[in-house]
Image (tube, grey):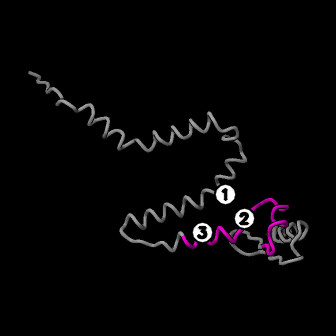
Amino acid sequence: MTTTVAPAAGTGRADVARWLQRYGVYVALLALLAFNLAFTANFLSVANLRTQLVQAAPVCIVALGMALVIGTEGVDLSVGAVMALAAAVVLISSDLEELVEGADRVVVLRAGAVVGELVGDDVSEHAIMAAIAAEAADD
């Protein structure tokens, strides 16, 4: 003999609330993506993806780190302050013309190591390319 138990009144609303608690972030993310796909002209362009990876990713990583520190009941605001200062004084670019126009000192890095440094009047597209090429020839 099989018995069935009728669900309690209001279970539907509780199920929806539980589902939203569990998957609401993903629904919101999909809604944001759909909105940007519909109303932002160059949302799926390679240039926009590159911009997001180069400019937004470091901020997201620091924000996640800060959330972890605060979530574990520690408060460390120095990470955010250092990140803000670093963003104000460091220009990261692969556009040589932009570097020459906006920088007084250029440091060429490869795998996190300094392979060349140009200061003042030495900063030019040709000098930057020479520093990159000289190190590439050594590899």
Query: Residue 56 vs residue 135: left or right?
Result: left
The three-letter code of the residue at mark 3 reads Ala
Q: State the image coordinates of residue 97 (x, y, percent, origin top left).
A: 85, 61
1 vs 3, front mark:
3
Q: Which residue is drawn at 11% across and 22% down?
A: 2
Q: Which of the 4 image quadrants contains residue 32?
A: top right
Q: State the image coordinates of residue 38 (x, y, percent, origin top left).
A: 62, 33
Q: State the image coordinates of residue 65 (x, y, percent, origin top left).
A: 48, 64
Q: Which of the 4 image quadrants contains residue 46?
A: top right
Q: Mark 1 and mark 3: span between their CA atoms?
A: 15 Å
Q: Which residue is drawn at 56% across and 35% down?
A: 34
Question: Toward the viewer: 10 or 136?
Answer: 10
The secondary structure type at the circle numbered 3 is helix
Q: Mark 2 and mark 3: span between their CA atoms?
A: 14 Å
The three-letter code of the residue at mark 2 reads Ile
Of the numbered discs in the image, which one, if any, rests on residue 92?
A: 2
Residue range in magenta is: 81-106
